Amino acid sequence: MATDNFVHAYIEAADKASKRSREMLTVIIIVTALIASIFWNARQGGWLARRVAQMEHRVEILQKLNDPSFTMAGYTLEDARLALADLRRRQREQTESVHIPVINTSLDINDVAIFSGAILILLMFLFRRALWQEVQATSHVFRTAESHDSLRPVYELLSPQQTLARAAPLDADEEHGQPWNALRLAAWAPMLVYFSLCVRSGIMLTADVDLTSLETWVYGWLTTIFFFAIIMLTRSLTAMLKSLDAIWLRAAGSAATHVASRNAACGSEVLTSTPPNEY
């Protein structure tokens, strides 16, 4: 009974560690998607730019007609001019600054690369810590289960709950191998998004803002350091995911070998215990 409680405690620890990893990956996906949306909406050729071009075309046509009462798509000349001015104001605000509703403030688009880099690095550090704990807890629970002759039930209990680990069912066909998990590619998303954001911010700085040599040096070095830190964290996360896969693969092999050897032992016992037929 004490042995079962001991194994159960390790199973709970491994399950909690896996849950923390999933939660951190979810936060990283959400934050990365928000940063990518900021980068996408702030580009020059966005949806708002197309609306501005369309409204400019309407104003141009209405001016040529020179009829204040004539409407086009529900706009008179005066309404179209007011709508165009509002769209241009919104376009300028969207491409030059980012509104943060939680603290009710705005952030210049050129500072997004600095702040988003720091946030992504912090989140990736936390994810790396959670993933390291999952690797340690999973390794401990499989070693403990194997020593108490309960590896297969523990494997079958934990494998359906895995999001990051490639935990194949023990009874699956060998030709299918380890399942491919597309969610693991999310670990590479911060690096790709931050690289795109740094490129865009560098273009904006060059085109729109006059900086001193010191400001350019500080901005360039900060974004470069952040980018290489994100690269190193991405490599570390990839290595940990491979270690987690290796742990599950070893556990699956040990469980299958243990079952096969036990079946063979049971078969030999049956053969030795069966008396010969007498005719």
Image (cartoon, rainbow, N blue to C red):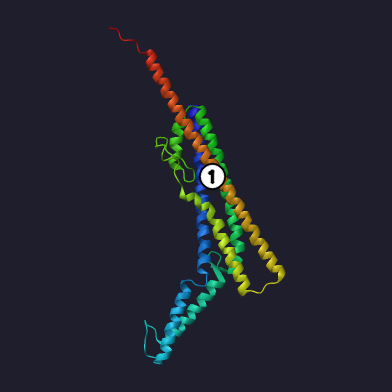
* SS state under label 1: helix
Going by the picture, which residue comes out furthest to the front?
Answer: 175
Q: Whole-percent x and y of residue 232?
A: 61, 51
Q: State the residue in front, 118 or 237.
A: 237
Q: Residue at x 65, y 58 (%)?
A: 225
Q: State the residue in front, 251 or 173.
A: 173
Q: Whole-percent x and y of residue 134?
A: 54, 42
Quadrant of the image occupied by residue 122: bottom right
Going by the picture, which residue comes out furthest to the left?
Answer: 279
Residue under label 1: 241
Q: Residue at x 56, y 39 (%)?
A: 136
Going by the picture, which residue comes out furthest to the bottom?
Answer: 66
Is 137 drawn above or below residue 78 in the view shown? above
Is 247 drawn above or below residue 260 in the view shown? below
Q: What's the residue type where badge 1 is placed?
A: Leu
Q: State the residue in front, 145 or 50.
A: 50
- In screen coordinates, is 116 left or right of 73? right
- In screen coordinates, is 107 left or right of 182? right
Mark 1 surroundings within 10 Å by alpha-carbon count, few (fewer than 14), some (14 through 19), many (20 or more): many
Q: Whole-percent x and y of residue 236?
A: 59, 47
